[in-house]
Amino acid sequence: MIILALMGFMAVIGIAMARIRDLFAVVILGGIFSLLGAAVYVILDAVDVGFTEAAVGAGISTVLLLGTLALTTSEEKVTPESRSLVSIVAVIVTGAVLVYGTLDMPRYGDPTAPINHHVAPRYLEKSGDEVGLPNVVTSVLASYRGYDTLGETFVIFTAAVGVLAILGRSRRQPKRKRMKARKG
Amino acid sequence: MIFEFAAGAVIIAMCLVLYRAVKGPTVYDRILAVNTFGTLTVIIIAVHGFLVGRPKFLDLALVYALINFIGTIAISKFVAFSGLGYPSEDEEKGDI
């Protein structure tokens, strides 16, 4: 019941975001949308996904979009009617294909689903002996999929270094000069 | 029983806040709406935890409140300075 109400709110916000031309309001509605999505994930027991959604969707991407608005304009350019017709057809077709793709999936929480039979029982039974950590999720992340996690860390580190290399230098220069001027 | 009523009340409050966030009309309405909506999300997660008898995720709701606070600060900064970070000319004020 709660989850239906939350998803109804998400639909309302989606429609409102598509119709509002003031981009500042759209960014704020996007933040609310992400918070709702995170709450839905928590209710569906996907706590880690909900956590990521809240941190990335409601936290950092709101900040990044506001930074973009500070550099550009906060008024949307209206596209002509004919082009928006083509886009809505494309969106509806894509959505129908995605919904069709979910029809073959096993029911939510089904014990006979493949995801509950592949390696999960082995992790649950043996990870205590093989890895020795009390938390199964931690031992999967840090040991069974250790190379995967290492690769992800590399990707995030490289992205951070790239962003710092592009943005970090020019902003700092004037301040340092000022500091020198003040000391001297 | 009390948790069902609480959930219903929070959802009605969410409807009202959502109306304010969509309709506006001023920027301050929207800032207040996004802040209040974050609080309501935290409450609904907590109430749902008690409804299904597993209040283990309460600490997660607290982290949501912190993240929502960061978002509110960023939005307020954007409204006040129309930017998120640059060195200011005035030494006394420091960087924005």
Image (cartoon, coloured by chain):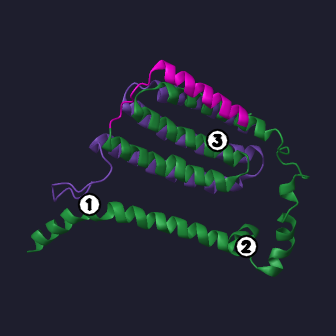
Q: Give the residues in magenta.
A: A73-97
Which numbered dot is residue A139?
Answer: 2
Chain B: colour as depicted = purple
Residue holding disc 1:
A171
> Does A80 appear in magenta?
yes
Assess disc 1: are there few (<14), some (14-19) or many (≥20) residues with their C-alpha within 10 Å of its C-alpha: few
What residue sits 78% from the left and 49% below the top?
A: B53
Same subunit: marks 3 and 1: no
Q: Which chain is green?
A: A
Q: Secondary structure at mark 3?
A: helix
**Earlier sequence position, callout 1 versus callout 2:** 2
Q: Report, in whole angstroms, how far the alpha carbon at label 2 lies from the one at label 3.
A: 32 Å
Answer above or below: position of B96 versus A13: below
For the residues carrying marks 2 and 3, which lies nearer the camera in this image? 2
Q: Residues within 10 Å of mark 3 (few under 14, many from 20)?
A: many
Residue B90 on image: x %, y %: 15, 55
The x, y position of residue A33, in whole percent, is 56, 38
Amino acid marked by disc 2: Ser
**Which one is closest to the eye, mark 3 or mark 1?**
1
Q: Whole-percent x and y of residue A64?
A: 42, 49
Direction from residue B8 to residue A53 in the image, left or right: left
Q: Quadrant of the N terminus of chain A?
A: top right
Please tell me which residue is depicted at 68% across the width and 48% down the height of the picture: A42
Task: Find the residue positioned furthest to the right.
Answer: A112
Mark 3 is on which residue type? Ile
Q: Chain of mark 3?
A: B
Kindly indicate whether the residue at mark 3 contacts the one at mark 2 (C-beta within 8 angstroms).
Answer: no
**What's the CA distance linking mark 3 and mark 1?**
42 Å
Q: Which mark is residue B44?
A: 3
